[in-house]
Image: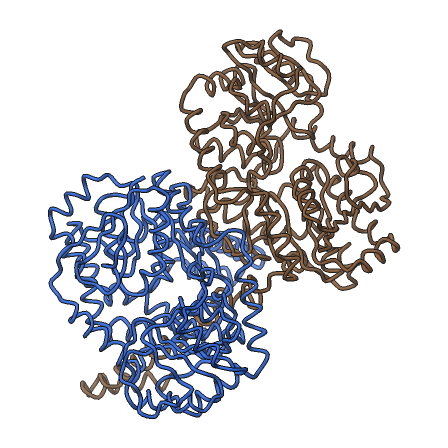
Chain colours: A blue, B brown
Amino acid sequence: GRLLVVPMDGSHWFTMQMVVEKLIHRGHEVVVVIPEVSWQLGKSLNCTVKTYSISHTLEDLDREFKYLSYTQWKTPEHSIRSFLTGSARGFFELTFSHCRSLFNDKKLVEYLKQRFFDAVFLDPFDVCGLIVAKYFSLPSVIFARGVFCDYLEEGAQCPSLPSYVPRLFSKYTDTMTFKERVWNHLIYIEEHAFCSYFLRTAVEVASEILQTPVTMTDLFSPVSIWLLRTDFVLEFPRPVMPNMVFIGGINCLQKKSLSKEFEAYVNASGEHGIVVFSLGSMVSEIPEKKAMEIAEALGRIPQTVLWRYTGTRPSNLAKNTILVKWLPQNDLLGHPKTRAFITHSGSHGIYEGICNGVPMVMMPLFGDQMDNAKRMETRGAGVTLNVLEMTADDLENALKTVINNKSYKENIMRLSSLHKDRPIEPLDLAVFWVEYVMRHKGAPHLRPAAHDLTWYQYHSLDVIGFLLAIVLTVVFIVFKCCAYGCRKCFGGKGRVKKSHKSKTH
Amino acid sequence: GRLLVVPMDGSHWFTMQTVVEKLLHKGHEVVVVVPEVSWQLTKPLNFVVKTYAVSHTQEDLNREFKIFIDAQWKSQQEGGILPLLDSPAKGFFELLFSHCRSLFNDKKLVEYLKQTSFDAVFLDPFDVCGLTVAKYFSLPSVVFSRGIFCHYLEDAAQCPSPPSYIPRMLLKFTDTMTFKERTRNLLAYMGERAFCHKFFKSAADIASEVLQTPVTMTDLFSPVSIWLLRTDFVLEFPRPVMPNVIYIGGINCHQGKPLSKEFEAYVNASGEHGIVVFSLGSMVSEIPEKKAMEIAEALGRIPQTVLWRYTGTRPSNLAKNTILVKWLPQNDLLGHPKTRAFITHSGSHGIYEGICNGVPMVMMPLFGDQMDNAKRMETRGAGVTLNVLEMTADDLENALKTVINNKSYKENIMRLSSLHKDRPIEPLDLAVFWVEYVMRHKGAPHLRPAAHDLTWYQYHSLDVIGFLLAIVLTVVFIVFKCCAYGCRKCFGGKGRVKKSHKSKTH
């Protein structure tokens, strides 16, 4: 079949690429549409890649993202409002603007129209894939860690009770106190009321391209299959819909043997083993003061620390700490000598930690990272640090706790065995569902009828109102009859008084 | 691992047996507990079977079931599950529920089960006994069922089920309902919540007696680890599900085997018109004579050869093209390219065999989920439903000619068939996987939603909404009072006197 892929830049692309590669390998004609400027997307792929020119440079992108990630070390932005409208604002504006550039390329649009694709495979983060799917009226498959705001609820008609399903960014668990439930509810209301405002640039771009006013819900609701890159080992159990497929852990590959360089580091670590430390591919620099605190703490543990860091080398770096520009994270985590994993708790890292059963010290920075960290902490498989307030002592204690306290290792091993015990590999599942949508031109039989109901119909408010009206009418009539009966029976004064009253009414 | 199986009698056992056999084949130690009197369970099995004495005989069971079936040919219930409360099915259910008391009266058996220390219980919840056994021995459980009566799936799996687009069982509604239908659907839902416990009263009483503590049906259902539901969204309307609810519809569709000589001969003799397969399932042995004659007459009017599985008296007007058989290889016949249509009672097994093999159906639902199955297939344009009470020979003839000659029925069933068979893993393997999963991990606590620990008003956030409303109202009240006070200050004079007077009187 013919598949159009509209990916998102950055770490998002790592796992989506695996699925796309497998689809190419299975003989599908794949066309990937990407902006000419990007971090990861331009890397070689053996399929048709169509680029479109955009108005900004890679430096603009770097600058905006650096501003975003740097701000996280100083001021917390732990709500949907501050995330979408805070330091990330400029980055989001750049990302959302891509779609306008894509549709300005008339030749590309004409080419895409001529190709008659069977489906679109997209990352909804920059919204562009959704617009493309709607523009060409193609069935779509979403590939995402999660979906912002209430668009999963609206777009898939998936019930999400604020009483036990914590909202994104809330850092709550599935067991909330009354106060937490109140806040969770308020976050839900905020999302419902303001998300369209926070994301207005994306909505404007979409409305302009589709030449009709659309909402985010309009863009999300035609989605055929939602491939969600999570799993109920991490996520709290919640209602799902039949067209939602969970493929968490898709990035846990069979580990390869280490390169000579890393093999040497690991072997030199002795009985204490190693600690793997990475804040992900996107965070290149840490403020100097923080970096020094971290370096100090790392120097106080007996393990060898492999730290993936591209910023300036902290001056107080201890002998046991080795700075590297890149490290084979999954392979290192899979090594039996690895004792702990210091991570920003991005979803890829978290799942690699789970797969390989390595207890974690988590330093969440932005996005879903806080929530991931909270979930792992709740399950007793890691310790979360607040990057703003954390001192060298905190980090040292956290590391010693997860390494020396057996319960962390036991918990992560239990999660690992639950996670890996599945009837079908997530990568195969993802490939299956993309091909399914291509074969059947969507999955209309999995689309709930709830899409065609208004909100008051969905909640049966009209029916309840109608039934209440009947009950009240009956009660009223019965009451009146009784009153009339009483008057008849007891007669006299009461009768005169009441008939007088009814006249005045 | 060691697995305890508490099955349900009748056609329920057919597919559950395939799962149990596969588990046995994979090297698990399986113990099946069955009553000594049953239709299907006492058939020879190649695993450990423990029987317990029951107080009724095979004849009692047959009689009660016959009373129930015979009633279906005279009047059919309308309006959801509630009429079941006082229906001819009651006696049959009472017999089933009583099994559990008999099981626990067998002290030796209970002791044996206790000693064996099983990893999990694999059960059919229909007669409730499996649930009681799982709770008694505190074992994780896997439910295997077509569906769950009443609101127990909603309550026990905490699976939301908005009555605005999810039709309740036995109502024959689709997922697109008019206002009137939605009203009836909501009323049926409320009725289930209010009255279902009455239907299951004797089952809950027996469970309370066995467990020596008062329990409700929800208490029995809610510890279930995994729900294996024998349906699929090709038949079922899409609805919210929970992570521990696994759909294994079509588990009974095997690759068709070649036909035996007898049936091969029938099929080959049918010529270009092909054959029609007719079966009302393993449980319906007899049809009232008048109906049987009407049916026989209609069958005689079509050019196809009809293979009719029927164990009752041969109708006197049976035509030449109709062949009565005591049993037929239903799935293999449906898989034959010469098969043109399938007349079925629309039990879930038959429906899925029809879907797998892509054969348009004429449906004569009798009881249970059959009406709903028929309605769903009809909505999808893959079959025609007949009302067995009112149907005449003409109706049946027309229905058969429609599904055979109108191409759209064949196209629709073929589309459903291709959707149904396009799946990443075979339902049987999936079922076996999840039973083993529960055995390996002693349940699936990480799939248990936190909603179980909330009260109903917490679940629906009514306390939070009330609290927020109270705050809003207080703020509005204070603002209003302040404004009123401000107005008084500003406009002074008469108004002020008047208002201060008023506030005094209050």
Q: Nearer the viewer, residue A61 or A27?
A: A27
Percent x, y for residue B114? 81, 59
Say if residue B184 shows up in the picture.
Answer: no
Q: Is residue A234 left or right of residue A111?
A: right
Say if residue A278 shows up in the picture.
Answer: yes
Q: Which residue is rendered at x = 53% and y = 24% of the image?
A: B362
Q: Nearer the viewer, residue A154 or A332?
A: A332
Q: Which residue is rendered at x = 72% and y = 57% of the image?
A: B134
Percent x, y for residue A403? 53, 82
Q: Is residue A381 above or below residue A319?
A: above
Percent x, y for residue B145? 62, 45
Q: Which residue is rendered at x = 68% and y = 51% of the image?
A: B122
Count the labels in the image.
0
Location of the N terminus of chain A by quadrant is top left
Q: Is residue A423 left or right of residue A137?
A: right
Q: Is residue B351 above or below residue A49?
A: above
Question: Which of the 4 image quarters holds residue B485?
Answer: bottom left
Q: Is residue B30 left or right of residue A38?
A: right
Question: Which of the 4 image quarters holds residue B311?
Answer: top right
Q: Nearer the viewer, residue B469 or A92?
A: A92
Determine the residue located farthest toward the top in the rendered image.
B320
Location of the C terminus of chain A by quadrant is bottom left
Percent x, y for residue A49? 22, 51
